[in-house]
Amino acid sequence: MQRAWPERPGRRPRAGSNVEPVGVDGPGRHVVLVGAMGVGKTTVGRRLARELQRPFADTDEQLELRAGRTIPAIFRDDGEEAFRRLESDVLAELLGAAHPLVVAAGGGAVTRPENRALLGRRAFVVWLRASSAFLAARADPTHRPLLAGDPDVAATLERLIAARTPLYEEVADATVDVESFDAGDDKPKRALARHIARLVGIPAEAPG
Ligand code: S3P
């Protein structure tokens, strides 16, 4: 039986977006990408899912589908706490899937202790790390309420990164410096996905 995790409304479904619940103990742990807004978790996660031949899910997309509203609308109408509760529910549901997934977690998912505990139990966590200057050039504020209308996105990112770095460190089984890939490869996202596939392939998939 195939169960689809649909993409955002209006988006074309992409390869690697189906989840197949196959029992309680699937082989291998979930792989979860964490890191700040704009670091490329979703793009790299989709590629990684293809590399590992696993389904892919993005917590932000899943949350919007379940809520039937966009993230900016949830922040605006119900506030950040309500968003965080939904985010925790989505993360728990995804990491409860029997079949191992690749999951891109929203940048702030690590702020809740129960999410960090769950990540520790259920996932091989890869922290995609980059500087605020690098991220400020890439993070589109349009769909990101914590950045929207901000006259100094780099400063806000810097503050968020400073507050969250210990949390990313706490959950990370591996850390990847995204900027070095961006500088060294003409297809950095592909190179990054392949690098992570090699990283997680050893501890997560090797027999014994
Ligand atoms: C957030 C990151 C966003 C999204 C929300 C809040 C954060 O996800 O969950 O806007 O607190 O850092 P991305 O990291 O995928 O942009």
Image: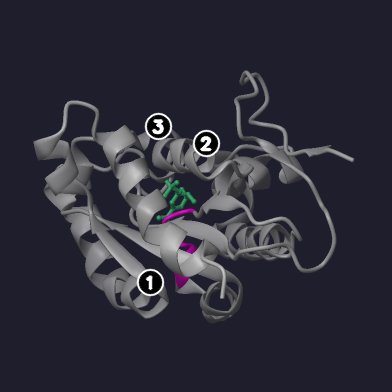
| Direction from residue 182 to residue 50 in the image, left or right | right
Q: Indicate the colouring scheme.
A: one colour
Please tell me the numbered disc located at residue 142. Answer: 3
Sequence-wise, which precedes: disc 1 or disc 3? 3
Name the residue at 22% across, 48% down: 178
- Amino acid type at circle 3 is Thr
Q: Viewer-proximal residue, 162 or 24? A: 24
Which of labels 2 and 3 is toward the front? 2
The span shown in magenta is 106-110
Question: Which part of the image, by quadrant, shows the C terminus?
Answer: bottom right
Between disc 1 and disc 3, the foreground one is 1
Q: Is residue 189 above or below residue 32?
A: above
x and y, in percent, of residue 125 in the image: 45, 66
Q: Is residue 134 above or below residue 166?
A: above
Any mark on residue 172, and which? 1
109 magenta-colored: yes
Which residue bears the numbered disc 2? 50
Say what amino acid the circle numbered 1 marks: Ala
- Could you tell me how far apart the alpha carbons at marks 2 and 3 are, in whole angstroms? 28 Å
Determine the residue positioned at 39% across, 72% down. 173
Residue 88 image-quadrant placement: bottom right
Q: Residue type at mark 2?
A: Arg
Residue 191 in the image, given as x and y percentages of width and height: 28, 38
Q: How many marks?
A: 3
Residue 180 lies, in percent from the top left, at 13, 47
Q: Which disc, if any, is residue 34?
A: none
Give the mark nearest the N terminus, 2 or 3: 2
User: Alpha-carbon distance for marks 1 and 3?
Assistant: 28 Å
Q: Residue furthest front?
A: 208
Would you identify the image quadrant in which residue 1 lies? top right
| Other-residue count near label 1 (Cα within 10 Å), few / some / many at <14 / 14–19 / ≥20 | many
